[in-house]
């Protein structure tokens, strides 16, 4: 019997929180009793450089390691992944499984007709979510784009994880209950994002609001 | 005078908050465990936290940097008695050797080019019988350059005299580091242990790891049980390097050196029963009766497990021999476990194929061995690649 699993590839720019988002999603999944394995793309870190992270979710133990080559879900955190080739995987949908899902952070369509035809051929669907706009509107900073992307993913991909587990994992991440250090520069970014808010509690609260709004947007 | 020095070292314990000492048996084999969702780097730090370490010395290199950074945090919290950043990897390996010679329990870690830079020190560790535990987060070296996962550096270390364990995942990494101390510090062993994990695949991957409580730790290392005394000018190996008699070109000096060599090799053999006890064996077997067996270590074992799943769904039964101890090598175990096998597949994350060579050298009818597939330069090994290799052989025979 084929195990029930979902493989996710998240692609974005260094500093957007693509790796942190994967760790948070994995933590949320593990809280629900399922198995999850999370890893980043194995490259040197640079701000705004192409960044990928991967989440494998299953009802069974997961042994598979490394980059997800055949994702069910592709989350594109920055339109430049598509428009400027800021991606380890080119084209950005390479390896997408039939019937898969692509979620793109953009206020307007950025996938060209040729690529869209390929995605259609796979029976996959592409959805645009203005994740950065939602982050600015509801959390007051574009640094919360990874949060709104998670909320949108949660709303668009049923069976991924429930919203409550996701929100709990975010609270843990920022309250220090579970320390997730995605990389050496993450600690500095944490300080940067904390400075955007009066208190850590406000940070968590605003992030949770932004995630809920993105979830609501995705479910529209 | 020697015993005074020992006392100074072992009494100088800055206890980390509320940790009590338990035996290695209790910590590794009996203590209840709880789930943690952590990376391999964090698993290293969790092991070191419970290992009652006297000294840890760091020099950063990807993908090792996070774990040695976290050990710096442990030092700040009082779990590690001394810690500093050295000039380079050679300095690190020389300095931990000095700390071990002085009677301390030490830990360090490195990766790829760092391993090669420090190379001279590894046989020195073994030659002076120091129970140093070092983690190697394996990565590419300059053929051509890559920071990404592959384990060619293990081939270079096979004959340094150190014991070598290969972790498949973060759980193994945690367990093998602690087991490393339990095994290395047996008086009849007293050799360095390298615990290897494929960089990134293990270090940067977050997964569930079962951990014993963190309010317990190993008993302090006691150099009194060592086969050689702490830094002592009158006994081997220090006397050997110091004393003109030993360094002279005469039969006595050759014989002394040769017998010391033999003793190091014999000590590694004597480690086997302790590896069986603390690591559950030098190998681990799934589907022991299968006619097709995969022999793999590290991440290649994980990718093989996925391949076995795929083939199982197609009605093809394939077994796995996971090699946990590379030194000593499980020669007898592999001979016995492959008695029924008609095809033996050895997937590896390096271009040289060191595990396939070891396997072939262990078996009589080794034309059964398919020395591959191999990936290197940082590539992942999709389980489909292993499946394809196996199917190619099956289809050719039909």
Image (cartoon, coloured by chain):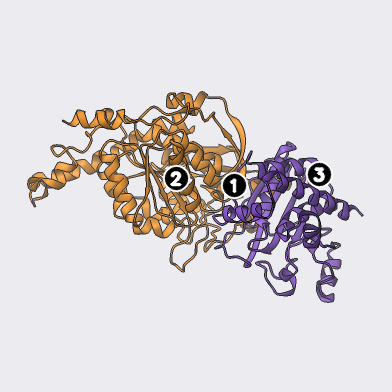
The percent coordinates of residue B12 (x first, y second) are 32, 31
Residue placed under numbered mark 1 in the picture: B302
In the rendered image, the quadrant that contains the C terminus of chain B is bottom right
Taking B220 as reference, is B329 above or below it?
below
Label 2 to label 3, Cα distance in Å?
A: 36 Å
Chain hosting mark 2: B
The chain that hosts pointer 1 is B
- The chain assigned the colour purple in the figure is A
Residue lying at 72% horizontally and 71% vertically, measured from the top left = A80
Q: Circle 2 sits on which residue?
A: B72
Chain letter tied to orange: B
Using the image, tell me which numbered label, if any, was put on residue B93: none
Specify whether B198 is left or right of A70: left
Within the image, what quadrant is residue B223 found in? top left
Instruction: State the count of labels.
Output: 3
Q: Chain of mark 3?
A: A
Left/right of residue B272 with respect to residue B97 in the rendered view: right
Do the residues marked 2 and 3 share a common chain? no
């Amino acid at each position: 019997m084929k195990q029930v699993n979902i493989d996710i590839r998240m692609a974005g720019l260094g500093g957007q929180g693509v790796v942190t988002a994967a760790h948070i999603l994995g933590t949320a999944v593990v809280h629900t009793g399922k198995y999850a394995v999370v890893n980043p793309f194995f490259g040197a870190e640079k701000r705004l450089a192409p960044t990928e992270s991967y989440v494998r979710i299953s009802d069974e133990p997961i042994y598979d390691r490394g980059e997800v080559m055949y994702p069910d879900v592709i989350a594109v955190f920055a339109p430049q992944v598509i428009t400027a080739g800021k991606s380890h995987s080119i084209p950005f949908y390479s390896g997408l499984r039939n019937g898969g899902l692509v979620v793109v952070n953009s206020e307007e369509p950025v996938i060209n007709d040729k690529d869209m035809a390929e995605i259609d051929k796979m029976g996959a669907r592409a959805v645009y979510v203005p994740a950065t706009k939602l982050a600015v509107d509801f959390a007051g900073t574009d640094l919360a784009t990874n949060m709104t992307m998670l909320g949108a993913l949660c709303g668009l991909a049923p069976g991924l994880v429930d919203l409550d587990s996701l929100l709990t994992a975010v609270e843990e991440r920022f309250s220090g209950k579970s320390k997730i250090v995605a990389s050496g520069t993450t600690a500095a970014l944490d300080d940067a994002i904390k400075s955007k808010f009066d208190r850590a509690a406000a940070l968590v609260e605003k992030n949770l609001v932004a995630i809920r709004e993105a979830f609501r947007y995705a479910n529209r | 005078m020697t015993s005074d020095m020992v006392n100074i070292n072992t009494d100088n314990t800055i206890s980390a908050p509320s940790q009590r000492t338990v035996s290695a048996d209790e910590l590794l084999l009996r203590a209840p465990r709880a789930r943690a969702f952590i990376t391999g780097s964090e698993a290293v730090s969790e092991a070191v936290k419970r290992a009652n370490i006297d000294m840890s010395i760091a020099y950063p290199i990807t993908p090792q940097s996070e774990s040695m950074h976290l050990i710096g945090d442990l030092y700040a919290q009082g779990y590690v008695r001394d810690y500093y950043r050295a000039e380079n990897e050679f300095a690190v390996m020389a300095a931990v050797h000095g700390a071990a010679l002085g009677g301390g329990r030490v830990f360090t870690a490195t990766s790829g080019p760092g391993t090669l830079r420090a190379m001279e020190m590894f046989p020195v560790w073994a030659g002076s019988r120091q129970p140093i535990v070092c983690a190697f987060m394996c990565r590419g070296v300059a053929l051509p350059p890559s920071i990404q996962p592959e384990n060619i550096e293990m081939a270079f270390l096979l004959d340094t005299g150190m014991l070598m364990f290969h972790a498949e995942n973060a759980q193994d990494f945690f367990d093998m580091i602690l087991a490393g101390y339990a095994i290395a510090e047996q008086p009849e062993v007293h050799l360095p242990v390298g615990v290897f994990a494929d960089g990134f695949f293990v270090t940067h991957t977050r997964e569930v790891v079962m951990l014993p409580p963190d309010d317990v730790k190993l008993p302090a290392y006691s150099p009194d049980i060592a086969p050689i005394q702490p830094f002592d000018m009158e006994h081997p190996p220090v006397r050997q390097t110091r004393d003109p008699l030993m360094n002279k070109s005469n039969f006595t000096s050759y014989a002394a050196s040769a017998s010391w060599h033999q003793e190091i090799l014999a000590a590694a053999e004597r480690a086997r029963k302790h590896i069986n006890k603390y690591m559950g064996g030098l190998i681990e077997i799934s589907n022991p009766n299968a006619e097709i067996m995969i022999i793999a270590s590290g991440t290649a074992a994980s990718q093989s497990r996925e391949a076995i799943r795929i083939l199982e769904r197609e009605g093809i039964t394939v077994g796995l021999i996971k090699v946990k101890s590379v030194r000593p090598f499980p020669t007898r175990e592999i001979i016995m476990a492959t008695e029924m096998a008609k095809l033996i597949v050895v997937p590896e994350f390096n271009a040289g194929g060191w595990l396939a060579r070891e396997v072939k050298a262990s078996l009589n009818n080794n034309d059964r061995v398919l020395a591959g597939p191999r990936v290197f330069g940082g590539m992942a090994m999709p389980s489909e690649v292993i499946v394809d290799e196996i199917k190619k052989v099956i289809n050719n025979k039909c």
